[in-house]
Image (cartoon, helix red, strand yellow):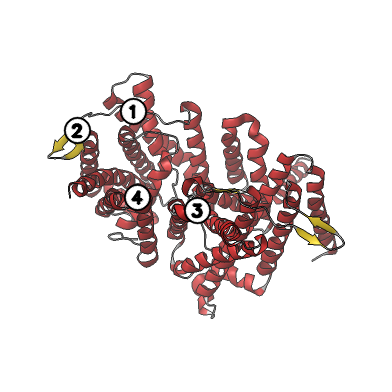
Amino acid sequence: MESLVQSIANGLMMGFIYVLVALGLSLVFSIMRIVQFAHGEIYMLGAYGVYFLCVKLGVPVFAAFVISAIVLALVGIVLERFFFRPFRGDVENSIIVSIGLILLLQTVASVFFGAQGKYIPEFLPGIMSIGSIRLPWERMLAVFAGITITILLFIFIRKTKTGQAMVAVSQDRDGAALQGINVNHISAISMAIGCALAAMAGALMGAIFQIDPAMGGFAMEKGIAVIILGGLGSIVGAVAGGIIIGLIDGIVPVFASTTIAYIIGFALIIIILIIRPKGLLGYE
Amino acid sequence: MKLGRIVSYIVLVIVFFLMPLLLRHNAYYLHVFILCGINVIMAISLRAITTTGQISFGHAGFMSVGAYTSALLVMKLGLSTYAALILGAAAAMAVAAAIAYPITRVRTIYLAMLTLFFGELIRLVFTEWRGLTGGTSGIIGIPPLGTISIPGLATIDFSTKLPYSFFILVLALITILFFYGIERSYVGMTFKSIAQDESLAASIGTNVANFKALVFCISCFFAGLAGGFYAHYNAVLAPDTFGLFPSLYILVYVIVGGRRKFAGAIIGAIVLTLIPEVFRVVKEYQPFVFVALLFLVIFLLRGGLVTLPEQVKIQMEKIHVRKNENA
């Protein structure tokens, strides 16, 4: 019984990191309408950014976290402008661009930091225990960050002009342009926010687990799975999807194995893609 | 087809058949040759899927089904390697058939994700099914292809790389002729009509789902065939060989090679298999070269490598015209 509750707790904590990745990815996907498969690499670079700043340069962890996110937001803007914008509408070539970027960014990380795993220090070391349930503070931070960022994003999108402009662009690009929205600016902003989110998720994940150049693939698969489950473009959907997949990944390994947890997750996604590609709460 | 063309194709085939002989003293070159052959089969079969407007990010997964099935049939049931090859390919086709119909209704971006996850699913299943497949460590000691004895002529035994080179060449040739024949036939035209406008094709009576599912299954048959060959050639199998990246690379071969022409997949597979091998000298910086080539092609040659000759022609004409204007 206790291990079940512990695994539920673990699952929820993982789930919120998935939510963070999925939110960033959802922004990029739905507003830019591009196949940004390299999003996982941004996540990975976010973790390495903190590693570089914190472990190599001695910058305090929290500052490293913020700087890394900002730097990657800028990187995202550059990528959008020079790699994705020229191929807007060209499905095939944007796939190649994404794949090329994945290779490029992974190789950059391998070359600069080496291929073995590294560690970044936790922001909040220590474990809180409720009874016999162990809740590491770092993972609680991930949950807290996930919830906070989700709420902030929700408010931003609903209440600010820019946020509403982003919704407009995701619904109808040309219509938004006709309304006077600078679609290119909005694309750049969304990419920046999306990449910052990925970088933060990567840094949080990196503090909990090891970081290595290949960690992006895992994030992408989870991110896409969450988006499909919850529905593209829906923030609430991303949260729901993240929690569900997090719970599967937390509970199933107790009874079977991690691999089977992933198999169940993927099988679920495949079935959803066939039956209801819109996801639980999506609109597209 | 014009006579000149036919002759040049025949010359090309002869050249390809001479290559293993020329390379026979260098096991590494033969290995690269064989890799090219395998990748050509994968690329051509994936290209066939794209002719109906579909896409697959999990093609390597079907290759692995063929590989494991063939290896296990020989090692556990004692079948002949050739029977196992065919059955392995059939198994890959069966797995494809399981999802072929459901995916005909799925839109491109979702299809990409679906096939990606399916490929990963196959890999995870092979990783988890330790009893059958040896898990992450995989299978070792897979028997080589069986000896072929042509009475009175020769006995071909597969103990060196040279026979494998010829075998893969023959397989690749069969694959190329098969898919080229389909593409130029009425069936191929139907595929392209589906890619251009599905509803229009359906409105004139084309059973879109049937055609899409058909090409998907046939394509995966050949992927399984390539996989079976790889199993017996490599003697060792591990699930991670067939993960996401190999699938992505095959897609890159098809798209960067050029989707508009049939030869694009062949050229993409050969050139992009050779690049990493040729640039092995720069070791961990090698992917930069590969990526540079990738970006070069998509920024400068929108249609892919196969459009290089016509682009060169266009540029030459532009220069020619400019010269005449100045004159």
Alpha carbon of mark 3 to alpha carbon of mark 1: how far? 36 Å
- Give the letter of the chain under mark 3: B
Alpha carbon of mark 1 to alpha carbon of mark 2: how far? 17 Å
Q: Of the numbered discs in the image, which one, if any, rests on residue B76?
A: none
Q: Amino acid at mark 2?
A: Ile
Question: Is B316 or B225 nearer to us in this picture?
Answer: B225
Q: Secondary structure at mark 4?
A: loop
State which quarter of the image contains the C terminus of chain A.
bottom left
Residue hosting label 3: B133
Instruction: From the top left corner, tell me how far across and down residue A69 is, in percent.
Output: 33, 33
Q: Is residue A23 left or right of residue B325?
A: left
Question: Are the residues at dot 1 and dot 2 in contact (C-beta closer than 8 Å)?
Answer: no
Residue hosting label 2: A127
- Give the letter of the chain under mark 2: A
Q: Amino acid at mark 3?
A: Thr
User: 10 Å neighbourhood of mark 4: few (<14), some, or many (≥20)?
Assistant: some
Q: Secondary structure at mark 3?
A: helix
User: 10 Å neighbourhood of mark 2: few (<14), some, or many (≥20)?
Assistant: some
Alpha carbon of mark 2 to alpha carbon of mark 4: how far? 25 Å
User: 10 Å neighbourhood of mark 1: few (<14), some, or many (≥20)?
Assistant: many
Q: Amino acid at mark 1?
A: Ile
Alpha carbon of mark 4 to alpha carbon of mark 3: how far? 17 Å
Q: Secondary structure at mark 1?
A: loop
Compared with B323, B11 (above or below) is below
Residue hosting label 1: A120
Compared with B248, A140 (above or below) is above
Q: Residue at x 44, y 41 (%)?
A: A80
Question: Are the residues at dot 4 and dot 3 in contact (C-beta closer than 8 Å)?
Answer: no
Compared with A179, A49 (above or below) is above
Q: Of the numbered discs in the image, which one, if any, rests on residue A257?
A: 4
Q: Secondary structure at mark 2?
A: strand
